[in-house]
Image (cartoon, rainbow, N blue to C red):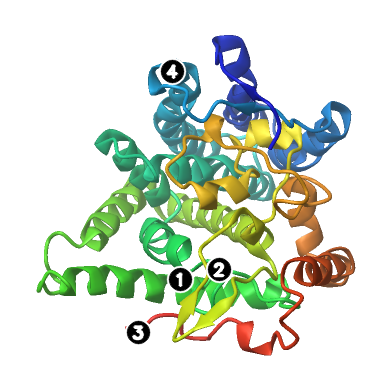
Amino acid sequence: MTDKKTTPSLAKALPFWLPLILPALVWLSAIMGGWWVVMVPLAAWYLVSILDAATGLNLENLDPNTPETALHWYRVVTLIWPPLQFVTLFGAMAYAINAPHLGTWETIGLFFGVGVMTGTIGINFSHELMHQRNRLERWLGDILLAMVLYSHFRSEHLLVHHIYVGTPKDTVTARYNEGFHRFFPRVLRQSLISAFAAEKNLLSRKNLPWKDRRNPFFRYWALQALMLATAALIGGWAGLGLFLLQAFVAIWQLELVNYVEHYGLTREHLGNGKYEHVKPRHSWNASHKASNWLLINLQRHSDHHYKPDRRFPLLQNYDPDEAPQLPYGYPIMTMAAMVPPIWRRVMNPKVRAWRKANYPQITDWQPYKNATNPLPR
C-alpha cells in the first residue's frame, strides 16, 4: 500500500461532493429541453472519463484508524443524497409531464438521464449506507433502493455476494468469457431468488418461517409500493412509465458495475465446498481520481471486500502486485462491457495473466465457472 494521510478535512472531502452536480443537470435538462436532456449521461460517462485522464491516479490512503468524528464532511453527502434524489426524481416527473416544451422523446431522454443518476449515484450511495451499523443510514439505503425497485439488492449483497464472491455460489461474479448481455438477464433472475433464499435461511436458523415480520422483504415491498403509488399520484400511467424507465436504467447501471468488479476472478477451492478467504486480489481495483470522486471510492473495491465495514474515505488503494488493476475507471470500463468483443480483447488477457501470477498450480479452470442456481430456495 501507499503512504497514509491522517488529517481528513472539509477541503479533502469536497471532491466527493461531485455527485451533487447530477441533480442540477437533471433540472437543467428538464428546463432547457432539446439536446440538453443528454447532459446527465454525457457528464457521468464522458466528462468524468476526460477528468480521469486529466487528473490521473490517486494513490494516497487515509489512515484506516481515523476516528469517525473526523469523517463528518464525507458522511454528510451520503446523508443528504436520499432526500435530494427523492425531490429530483418526483419533482422532475411532475415538471416534465406538465411541461409544454418537452416532447415525448425529450421526456424519455430526460428520464433515461434520471436513471443514470439514480443508478450511478443513488444505488452506489445505498451500498455505502447499507454497510453501516447506524439504523438511520440503513433505512436511507433502503429508501434509495426502493426508488429503483431493487430493494432485494441489500439482502443479496450482504448475505450472498460478500460471503460467496468469487465462488460458484455468487450470482454477480461474472464468469470468464461471459458477455454482459448474458450476465444481465441471468443476474436479474438469480439475484432475487438468492436474496430471498438467504433471508429465508437466516430466519429458519432461528426456527422462524419466511413469513415472519422480521423478513426485510416485507419492508422492501412496502417501500417499493409507496414509490410506485407516488409516481402514479403525480403522473398517472405516464408517471408510472417514467418511473419504471428510470428504475430499469438504474439497475442496468448497477449490474454493469457488478459485471466489471469481479469479472473472471475466482477464489481457490480448498475441497469439501470450502474456498480460500477473500483477499484484495479477488476484485478489480481502479485508482482514477475523478471517477472515484463521483463513485465515492467504489473503485477501491479490493479493499471494500477485504474490509467491508470501512467507510468509503478510509478504503485503501492497493498496488498492482496486491490487487488486479483496471486500465481505466468504471465509466470507460462499463461502456466497454456493452461491446463484448472489445471487452474480451481488453480483459481476457488480464484475467489469464492474473491466473498465471496468483494460481499457477491450477490448470483446469472449468470447475470454477458459476453455478446456475447459486443457493437453494
Q: Residue at x 69, y 59 (%)?
A: 260
The amino acid on which the numbered mark 4 sits, given as a three-letter code, is: His
| Quarter in which the C terminus is drawn | bottom left
Residue 102: give x, y in percent of width and height: 64, 38
Pick the front one: 152 or 176: 176
- Judging by the rendered image, the residue that carries numbered circle 3 is 376
Residue 285: give x, y in percent of width and height: 70, 49
Please state if 59 lies on the left or on the right of 327 as rendered.
left
Q: Residue at x 57, y 69 (%)?
A: 166
- Judging by the rendered image, the residue that carries numbered circle 1 is 191
| Quarter in which the N terminus is drawn | top right
Tell me the CA gap for discs 2 and 3: 16 Å
Badge 3 crowding class, 10 Å Cα cut-off, few under 14, some 14 to 19, many 20 or more, is: few
The amino acid on which the numbered mark 1 sits, given as a three-letter code, is: Ser
Pick the front one: 123 or 97: 123
Number of the front mark, 1 or 4: 4
Mark 3 residue element: loop
Which badge, 2 or 4, is on the more N-terminal residue? Answer: 4
- Judging by the rendered image, the residue that carries numbered circle 4 is 72
Q: Are marks 2 and 3 in contact (CB under 8 Å)?
A: no
Q: Residue at x 70, y 52 (%)?
A: 323
Mark 1 residue element: helix
Number of the front mark, 2 or 1: 2
